[in-house]
Amino acid sequence: MSNIFALVDCNNFYASCEKLFRPDLRHRPVVVLSNNDGCVIARSKEAKALGIKMGVPVFKIQQEIRTHKIKVFSSNFALYADMSARVMNTLESMVPSVEIYSIDEAFLDLSNTQAIMPLQQYGENIKQAIGQWIGIPVCVGIAPSKTLAKLANYAAKKFPATQGVVDLTSPQRQRRLMELVPVEEIWGIGRRLGKRLNAMGVRTALDLADSPEKLIRKQFSVVVERTVRELNGESCIALEEIPAAKKQIVCSRSFGQRVTTFNQMREAVCEHTVRAGEKLRKERQQAKVLTVFIRTSPFSTDRPQYSNAASSELVNATDNTRDLIALAVKLLKQIWRDDYHYAKCGVMLSDFYASGIYQPDIFDVLNTHSAGNRGDAARSNKLMNLMDQVNRKNKGGLFFAGQGIKKQWAIKREHLSPAYTTRWGELPKVR
DNA sequence: TCTGGGGTCCTAGGACCC
DNA sequence: TCTGGGGTCCTAGGACCC
């Protein structure tokens, strides 16, 4: 019984989500920008055809935007997450084992489906269903390892003749395709490794597949060795249906405008701490270590640079936002320096324990809020639950005073689309 | 003027222990 | 005295992913 994986990948996902609610934009170039409207993170096929590059800062393409009337959107992650959930639910209704790999990609286990129908047709059915029910175009790649499934998907996207579905289970087809694919297009081979491989004369995926495993392991690492095996059809990376528990949580943002006062910085740090706490409780984890970092912009060469981080252990692992905020502000005071133009700050949580499992040391002093005494701890947890509930329904409905109200540092989002699917007031209307 | 955010894994090297 | 050698743990840095 051999492994068969499929990789389903949404085409130009964020741009496709935006287009879905704007039929008037069907044939127009669309780009979606990163937080702060900084650079391009998604492009519709029309925008790609105009030569707009991934990751380009938007100020560098103002001319193209005007000439070609490119429609620009700020990123609207609430919308994309909701559309993603619909796509994933549909896949789960069609296939028994699904690994949600990213917001717009999923691996499927098709090992036991060949008796039902040919793989090619299976892939076409999936593509058709997502297109018809959700309205999002996808490509499907099918192969005996995840790395080859990724490669099959690459071919499905790159070659229109495939109509978006490639069955790469035949070794002959694998070799023919790999001969055409540059080595740095392989999953797991980035720019750096690509360069080093090129220098060794390894230029195509086929070159890498035919490289001796021992040599690759010695020159690089077990990771690259595994890639070689996967390219040869040996499945080394299993399907992971249940997402692994997170080992760290990071919340950080660049500011919409530079921050120069401690109070503004404190507000932003509090805001990130609150969001990190929400994520932590959603993971049903408690954290023992918290890190705060602040920095100026590495791109502004005319101003003095400063970047620093401070990290500290809580006495007890906690998921209580009040404890986290108290520590975050204390750490911020340690690293704050006046007279800099700050561009970014962030909060990181690590050293996790499952909620309810953490055993405090018998000599540990108890945390002020979460465990001052039992009654206090219970009240505090109730408060967190209540805040999470309210904020799920009404984002930002309840917040800590430290997060601030005016938020002059908040990110820039000048081209935001409405919350079509997650706010009643912004549902699309049919006239 | 204007350059994202959030993750993971591996390795090398130092500290420390026996 | 000897300053070996193996094991473990931690951290920083590098590389990758979307």
Image (tube, coloured by chain):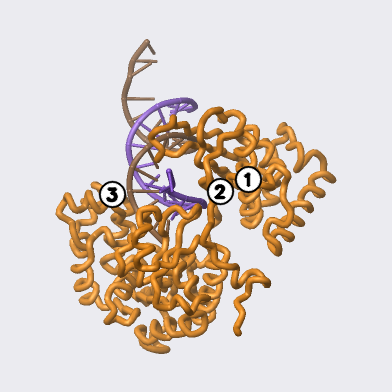
Chain colours: A orange, B purple, C brown
Q: Which mark is residue A70?
A: none
Name the quadrant containing residue A429. Answer: bottom right
Amino acid at circle 1: Thr
Q: Residue at x 35, y 76 (%)?
A: A142
Of labels 2 and 1, earlier in sequence is: 2
**In the rendered view, does A237 fall on the left or right side of A344?**
left
Q: Quadrant of the C terminus of chain A?
A: bottom right
Q: Secondary structure at mark 1?
A: helix
Residue bearing mark 3:
A192
> Can residue A96 be seen?
no
State left or right for residue A321 relative to residue A217. right
Q: What amino acid type is highlighted by mark number 2?
A: Cys
The chain ID associated with circle 3 is A
Instruction: Estimate the x, y position of residue A17 in percent, counting from the top left.
Output: 49, 71
As rendered, which of A182 and A346 lies closer to the eye? A346
- Labels 2, 1: one chain: yes
Q: Is residue A155 left or right of residue A279?
A: left
* Tag 3 and tag 1 share a subunit: yes
Mark 3 or mark 1: which comes first in sequence?
Answer: 3
Using the image, name the chain to which the residue with label 2 belongs: A
- Find residue A304 and report its image quarter: top left
Residue kind at label 3, given as amino acid type: Arg
- Asked whether the beta carbons under mark 2 and mark 1 sit within 8 Å of each other, the answer is yes
The correct choice, above or below, for A163 with respect to A262 in the image is below
Residue wearing tag 2: A251
Q: Is residue A152 above or below residue C1?
A: below
Q: CA separation, marks 2 and 1?
A: 7 Å
Locate residue A404: give its quadrant: top right
Q: Nearer the viewer, residue A118 or A296?
A: A296
Q: SS of the residue at dot 3?
A: helix
User: What residue is shown with label 1?
Assistant: A273
Q: Residues within 10 Å of mark 2 (few under 14, many from 20)?
A: some
